[in-house]
Amino acid sequence: MDEIKAMLLQEKENIIADILKTQEHMPKDHDIGDEIDSSVEDQERKLMLLLQDREREKLEKIERALIRIENNDYGECEECGEPISPKRLMIVPFARLCINCKQEEERTSGVYSREDMEGSLRYMEE
Ligand SMILES: [Zn+2]
């Protein structure tokens, strides 16, 4: 459990560092060129905001997992209450659902989250 907590904290630091890095590279407002330049800048800005949204979402998941560790209910499936397999937690440390419920959710919603998809791919290789 300590190992997973350390992993989550490390991941959190990485994401925060990434967000800070992205912000540094944000196009500056004072540099307003001609129309073409500013539209390119707009696109870059949108892309970065999108990236940040995704990172923020991940950060929230990690925060939630850390809170659950503190509350001692980490590692339980939020859907069926069964323990999530330690193997899955090592791959997706902020997983909220066990692999069965996750697959069920993906089947019914048709939504795949990238990190969980990577996780299940690695799962199959084992
Ligand atoms: Zn479950």
Image: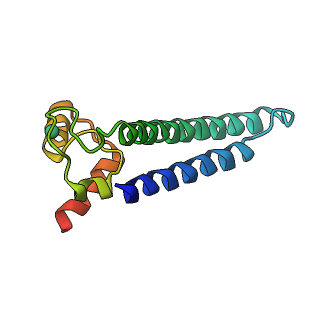
x 51%, y 42%: residue: 55
Q: Residue at x 25, y 62 (%)?
A: 122
Q: Nearer the viewer, residue 41 or 98?
A: 98
How far across and down, in percent of the image, does residue 24 sit?
74, 46
For this orientation, the residue located farthest to the right is 30
Residue at 82% across / 34% down in the picture? 34
Vertical arrangement, residue 25 with respect to residue 6, above or below: above
Q: Nearer the viewer, residue 121 or 37?
A: 121
- Left or right, 33 with reference to 83: right
Q: Tell me which corner region of the image, top left, top right, bottom left or bottom right, holds residue 4.
A: bottom left
**Closer to the camera in the image, 45 or 69:** 69
Closer-to-camera residue (15/24)? 15
* Quarter of the displayed picture in which ligand 1 can be seen: top left
Indicate the colouring scheme: rainbow
Residue 103 percent across, percent down from the top left: 16, 42
Picture quarter with the N terminus: bottom left
Task: Please say if 123 is above or below 23.
Answer: below
**Count of numbered circles in the view:** 0
Q: Quadrant of the C terminus?
A: bottom left
Q: State the image coordinates of residue 121 (x, y, percent, origin top left).
A: 24, 59
Q: State left or right for residue 107 relative to residue 14.
A: left
- Using residue 54 as the reference point, say whether residue 87 is left or right of it: left
- Residue 22 image offset from top left, x and y in percent: 66, 46
In the picture, residue 31 is in which quadrant? top right
Which residue, as the protein is rendered here, is positioned at the far bottom? 126
Residue drawn at point x = 84 percent, y = 36 percent: 33
